[in-house]
Image (cartoon, rainbow, N blue to C red):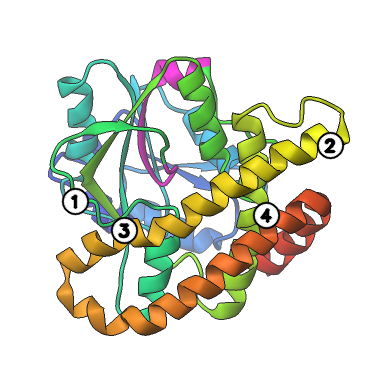
Amino acid sequence: RCLHSLEDQTLAVSLAKQVILVDSQDAPKARIQELTAAFPWIQVVQVAPQTPYYAAKMAGYEQTTGDGVLFCDSDCQYQQDWLAQLLGVFKTHPDAGIVAGETCIEVDDAFSFAVALIWGFPTFSNQQKPYRANFYAANNVAFKRSVLKDLPIPDELSVYRGNCSVHSIELRKQGFKIYKNDQARTLHPLPAKNFRELFWRFLVNGRDWLIWDRRANRAQTNKNFLFNLAQDGISFIKVSSRWLARPFIKLPRALAQDKNRFVFLPLALLIIIYTECIFILGFILGMLFPDQILKVGSKKLES
């Protein structure tokens, strides 16, 4: 589905210098051969099994030669004008170093509506023109090659996901400008498909946000315990407020797109409250047991 959506782009993907499929050897070789036969414009690059997500992306980047590098994910489907919408921003905004698109989650019941409202993808925005942004998602983004050369996506971080969030922070510190074009859309499957996965996703996510915030604000540099605790307390208030506000900021835009979603709202709000509590719990436990939360949570999610 992903490759078909790329093949159907209004701007022919076959014009790219390389279209690289990074194979961490999870798929059978016969399946990879079928894909290369069906889509002869892809080039397969093999990496070691269990190669982490961001390391796999950077392994693909190392094989490219173009002035621009775009990242996709194999579980996403890209709208027909996605490629043109991303690349077009570099022409209209020459100062852009990174251009992100909008990642959408399909809403068809209360559970998916709740996840779409609370998840980190800034969905339902529907802005018509590109604008400055603080973050990008690695499943829907274009870079000037020089940006990745100067500041690669970090691989070895003590977080489950979200290296791109840390990378975004470092990019802005270095003066690189991130733009977002909501017209460059991709459809993403549900990040959590049931309540068990939702629990572990947001428990680990709460812990990860603590780590990201420490890095962004240079907290935990002082070895004084009380100082560190005060810094984490400030982070807790700031991050929790942001997460509590997020679904209510998105809600009017989501309902404006489709008023029929009102029917999902009562149950979705209960799921959001449950999820917010899990996130806050993960943040607090991350202050006390950061390594254990990451280890157990990663194991549960990968299983």
Badge 1 is on which residue?
Answer: 126
Rounded to the nearest whole Å, what is the CA distance between mark 2 and mark 4?
A: 18 Å
Q: Are marks 2 and 4 in contact (CB under 8 Å)?
A: no
Observer-nearest residue: 50 or 15?
A: 50
Stretch of the chain drawn in magenta: 137-150
**Residue 285 percent across, percent down from the top left:** 76, 58
Q: Secondary structure at mark 3?
A: helix
Q: Is residue 143 left or right of residue 273?
A: left
Q: Which mark is nearer the camera, 4 or 1? A: 4
Secondary structure, mark 1, is loop
- Residue 250 is marked as 3
In the picture shown, does residue 14 fall above or below 169? below
Q: Are dots 4 and 3 in contact, CB under 8 Å?
A: no
* Amino acid type, callout 1: Asn
The residue identified by callout 4 is: 283
Tag 2: amino acid:
Leu
**Disc 3, disc 2: CB below 8 Å?**
no
Query: Could you give the CA–CA distance between mark 3 and mark 2, rounded to whole angstroms?
Result: 36 Å
